[in-house]
Image (cartoon, rainbow, N blue to C red):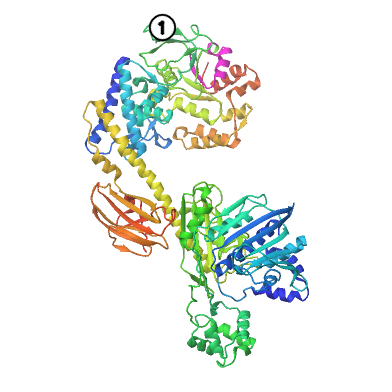
């Protein structure tokens, strides 16, 4: 994150921002006219979402594209956020790298992209036209309307007009900018594709999109709950770079080195601070503002030699399994997917930086069965559309053997083929992007591992669904066999021989020879009732344990009969001596759910050979 | 034994199968039928009859699986149908058997392959011929021209003598589906050889060129993969009148299989090879060597041809030096020829040059 700022600062002496921009179009995301439109919309929408969330407002965002000329479009993005005070408007929109969060360690979209000012600059460079920003900070305040350009020599805003105006909205910001671009649809890398993906991982947002031809698309919100605000955390010594450390030391208000370390870093107690300074061989009482480069190096080296606790991880704001599922279900509705599975990992740490992986797999329905699966990558709720091949998420997917989960994959490596969409969301206070364009996440071993573990869990659920389906088809065949074909054979053969029809019950038990587990999920008024029925088609009484997996973030209602164990992730019943031909029913309720949040049970058995059971998998342990 | 006796014996055997299924159910056993597996890997050479028959491998049709249960249900329905048909002195084609199953509810066949196969299964289980169950194939046997007199019982019950040159038109005597002694008697013949010909075009060429008269041959048109009655008729000519049999086909892997079914027995009907196969029959051509020696016009082998040739290399029926050399030669050339390619040298070349040369080479003095 420093490289560009420092690079820009250095280069600024010699070249203007316009030149700098021209030379770095690609890393800034403006290398093609299609991408320029997407990047501009992305910057504006990311800002809008961040602003709304920080202010605790449910985002209501309008994106409109108007065709001005063959290759010129007007982009309008309007939000209902808190607005921007008049004084700040020119700095936010017309000054490159203003207010970038260089050492803020907080999960936010804003870490991504070069900022909206790059879009303003691109607009100005390609059309010569100014950008118009309207903003209002609340009822009783006037709205301000600024017409801006960037002075490319000085990297300073130039205000052409500034007027007070009336705006119905109680608060919000609207930006209008014209630029050269080309509009495409029907692919992932498009404004539509970006907004659709955004809608999936921002289920609390309401987004209206008006295409250049006037076509209006509304992405509805699926939850009225704003995501919890991520907390800012202090940097952890394990991940700190020398440059950042020096900057922090110079700006520190702490009087001594010990208090500097213990108050401005996470997981450093006073005790640990002393230990670090001792290892570095420095005087604990010197002022952090006065340390030399050499001293700084020694401290950063000493950081690696002490045992420290991991940084706090409750600073992350994941989406949550149920909301991912709702988001996917809503946006994939047209595909009528057969099954959606999700998974959420516990937070983890790389180089002292907390991160967290969430995944989802959409399977079946109208998805093409013989094409490469679609990969939806997200970082801090922002879709990553480009550089798929360079991303650790793609790497994790490629390095997993998907064949065991029912997808095709040549040689067990590479992107799998099959009717599936794979979603991976990584949240972190500092996403390690490969470059400033922030489209691919770097190959960090810890992240790849977490991606794989999460996808494996997700894929296991998918496979569970598939094999359950498969075995149910087989079981259905057996039911046809015993209920239709076998009685027919008995009837016809006895008729031909002029003998009485023989009883076939024993033969039926012999043919079935299984425990049949069936389940039913009913939704009613925010309540889901799941009923599991077990029938013993074996010729002896059977005893075993039955586990029913519970979804994430659920609230349990009534469980019948009383379960032997209720844990975070499952309910366990002990089934004692179910007699041949006996059928028993178990049930549980989930409260505060929406239709589709929980569609089928994932069941496991223990204490019985799973070959003898249809409708449940082998229990693999907690 | 009259035809009626044979029918009655077949019904008796079939009812035993129905009874077996019934008894299984009655005694709380899962009903099943055990049948020899009908695959290339399960045929063995029967020294006594010098033909290829099924070996010891079996497959079980058990009601434990849905497919097996369907098969058992169809079996009882089919037996019931055949029994009633025989009681009424009717017969039906295999295709009619398939269509009649429309009325059998769950016992309905899903394709004619299924019903054809079941008819063969019943033959294997009862050790009776399909013809004894009054099931006949769609097409009759093929055509015969030559110095031969047969006596056929017509559908009116009369005996009719037919001379297969004098009493027939250019298309010859047509072999009926039932060629057992009760129906067809082979009477006088002076022929020195039976020549079984694959294609109608070549059969007609030999007839037009008067090959049957000039060389004293009985020409039998195989019509591709020969019907059972054709194979049975050839066998009877060979055994009862002691006339040698040669087979003249195209030079491709499919034609070699036609020869194999005439001489060794077909895999599908290996349970009745001793009724159908003529072990002394010899392959005349077109051989891959002929393609080379006679410089015949060729086509490239297709992917399917190559696979078929390779499969023949692992087929026990083709395990001898002659076939191994010829098949390997053909795979090396990558070419195939039709018997009518001999017309390259004129219409009479086949009768004046090719066949006499080949027959002499094989040791026939005709």
Instruction: Please determine whether, in this image, residue A265 is positioned above or below residue B144.
Output: below
Magenta segment: does it hold A420?
no
Determine the residue positioned at 33% across, 23% down.
B81
Determine the residue positioned at 45% across, 18% down.
B141
* Residue A69, image x, y percentages: 75, 53
* Residue B112, image x, y percentages: 43, 28
Instruction: Please determine whether, in this image, residue A14 is positioned above or below residue A188.
Output: below
Snapshot quadrant of residue B183: top left
Q: Is residue B32 visible?
A: no
Residue highlighted by disc 1? B160
Determine the residue positioned at 43% across, 25% down.
B279
Given residues A293 and A228, the one toward you in this image is A228
* Residue A608, image x, y percentages: 30, 55
Label 1 CA crowd tier, 10 Å (few <14, some 14–19, many 20+)? few
Magenta segment: does it hold B204?
yes
Q: Is residue A258 left or right of residue A508?
A: right
The residue stretch that appears in magenta: B191-213
Given residues A156 and A1, the one toward you in this image is A156
């Amino acid at each position: 994150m420093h490289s560009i700022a420092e690079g820009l600062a250095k280069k600024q002496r010699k070249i203007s921002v316009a030149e700098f921009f021209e030379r770095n179009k690609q890393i800034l995301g403006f290398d093609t006219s299609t991408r320029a439109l997407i990047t501009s919309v992305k910057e504006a929408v990311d800002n809008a979402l961040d602003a709304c969330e920080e202010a605790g407002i449910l985002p209501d965002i309008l994106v409109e594209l108007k065709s001005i000329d063959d290759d010129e479009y007007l982009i309008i993005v309007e939000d209902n956020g808190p607005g921007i005070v008049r004084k700040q408007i020119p700095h936010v929109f017309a000054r490159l790298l203003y207010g970038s969060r260089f050492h803020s360690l907080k999960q936010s979209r804003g870490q991504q992209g070069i900022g909206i000012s790059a879009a303003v600059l691109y607009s100005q460079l390609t059309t010569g036209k100014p950008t118009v920003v309207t903003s209002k900070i609340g009822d009783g305040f006037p709205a301000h309307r600024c017409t801006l350009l960037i002075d490319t020599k000085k990297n300073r805003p130039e205000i052409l007009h500034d007027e007070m105006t009336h705006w119905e909205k109680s608060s919000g910001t609207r930006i209008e900018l014209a630029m050269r671009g080309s509009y495409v649809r029907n692919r992932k890398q498009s404004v539509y594709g970006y907004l659709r993906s955004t809608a999936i991982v921002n289920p609390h947002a309401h987004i209206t999109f008006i295409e250049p031809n006037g076509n209006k698309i509304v992405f509805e919100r699926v939850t009225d709950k704003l995501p919890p605000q991520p907390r800012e955390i202090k940097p952890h010594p394990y991940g700190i770079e020398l440059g950042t450390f020096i900057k922090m030391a110079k700006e520190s208000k702490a009087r001594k080195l010990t208090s500097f370390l213990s108050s401005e870093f996470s997981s450093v107690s006073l005790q640990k601070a002393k230990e670090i300074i001792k290892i570095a061989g420095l005087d604990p009482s010197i002022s952090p503002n006065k340390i030399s480069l050499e001293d700084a190096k020694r401290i950063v080296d000493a950081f690696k030699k002490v045992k420290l606790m991991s940084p706090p991880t409750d600073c992350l704001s994941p989406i949550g399994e149920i909301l991912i599922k709702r988001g996917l279900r809503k946006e994939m509705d047209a595909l009528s997917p057969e099954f959606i599975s999700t998974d959420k990992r516990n937070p983890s740490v790389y180089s002292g930086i907390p991160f967290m992986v969430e995944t989802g797999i959409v399977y079946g329905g109208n998805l093409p069965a013989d094409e490469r699966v679609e990969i939806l990558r997200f970082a801090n709720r922002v879709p990553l559309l480009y550089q798929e091949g360079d991303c650790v998420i793609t790497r994790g997917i490629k390095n997993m053997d998907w064949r065991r989960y029912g997808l095709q994959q040549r040689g067990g490596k590479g992107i799998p083929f099959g009717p599936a969409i794979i979603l991976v969301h990584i949240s972190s206070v500092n996403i390690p992007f490969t470059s400033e364009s922030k489209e691919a996440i770097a190959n960090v071993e810890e992240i790849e591992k977490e991606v794989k573990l999460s996808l494996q869990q997700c894929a296991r659920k998918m496979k569970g669904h598939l094999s359950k389906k498969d075995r149910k088809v087989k079981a259905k065949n057996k039911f046809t066999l015993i209920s239709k074909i076998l009685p027919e054979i008995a009837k016809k053969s006895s008729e031909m021989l002029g003998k009485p029809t023989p009883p076939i019950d024993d033969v039926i038990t012999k043919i079935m020879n299984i425990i049949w587990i069936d389940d039913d999920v009913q939704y009613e008024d925010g309540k889901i009732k799941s009923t599991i029925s077990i029938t013993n088609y074996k010729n002896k009484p059977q005893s075993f344990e039955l586990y029913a997996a519970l979804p994430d973030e659920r609230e349990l209602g009534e469980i019948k009969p009383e379960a032997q164990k209720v844990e975070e992730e499952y309910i366990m019943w002990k089934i004692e001596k179910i007699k041949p031909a006996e059928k028993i029913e178990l049930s549980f309720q989930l409260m505060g759910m929406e239709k589709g949040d929980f569609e089928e049970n994932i069941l496991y058995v223990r204490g019985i050979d799973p070959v003898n059971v249809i409708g449940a998998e082998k229990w693999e342990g907690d | 034994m009259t035809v009626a006796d044979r029918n009655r014996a077949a019904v008796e055997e079939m009812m035993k199968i129905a009874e077996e299924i019934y008894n299984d159910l009655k005694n709380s056993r899962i009903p099943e039928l055990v049948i020899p597996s009908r695959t290339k890997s399960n045929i063995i050479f029967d020294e006594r009859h010098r033909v290829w028959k099924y070996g010891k491998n079996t497959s079980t049709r058990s009601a434990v699986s849905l497919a097996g249960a369907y098969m058992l249900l169809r079996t009882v329905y089919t037996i019931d149908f055949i029994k009633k048909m025989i009681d009424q002195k009717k017969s039906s084609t295999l295709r009619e058997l398939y269509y009649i199953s429309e009325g059998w509810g769950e016992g309905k066949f899903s394709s004619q392959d299924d019903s054809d196969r079941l008819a063969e299964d019943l033959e294997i289980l009862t050790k009776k011929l399909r013809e004894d169950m009054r099931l006949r194939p769609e097409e009759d046997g093929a055509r015969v021209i030559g110095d031969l007199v047969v006596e056929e019982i017509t559908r009116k019950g009369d005996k009719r003598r037919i001379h297969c040159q004098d009493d027939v038109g250019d298309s010859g005597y047509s072999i009926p589906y039932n060629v057992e002694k009760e129906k067809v008697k082979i009477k006088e013949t002076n022929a020195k050889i039976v020549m079984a010909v694959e294609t109608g075009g070549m059969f007609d060429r030999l007839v037009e060129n008067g090959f049957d008269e000039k060389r004293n041959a009985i020409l039998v048109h195989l019509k591709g993969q020969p019907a059972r009655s054709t194979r049975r008729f050839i066998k009877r000519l060979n055994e009862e009148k002691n006339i040698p049999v040669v087979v003249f086909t195209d030079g491709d892997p499919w034609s070699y299989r036609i020869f194999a079914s005439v001489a060794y027995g077909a895999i599908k009907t290996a349970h009745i090879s001793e009724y159908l196969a003529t072990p002394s029959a010899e392959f005349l051509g077109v051989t891959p060597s002929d393609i080379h020696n006679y410089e015949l016009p060729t086509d490239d082998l297709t992917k399917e041809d190559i696979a078929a040739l390779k499969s023949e290399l692992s087929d026990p029926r083709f395990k001898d030096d002659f076939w191994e050399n010829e098949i390997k030669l053909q795979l090396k050339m990558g070419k195939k020829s039709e018997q009518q390619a001999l017309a390259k040298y004129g219409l009479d070349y086949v009768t004046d040059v090719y066949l006499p040369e080949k027959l002499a080479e094989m040791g026939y003095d005709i």
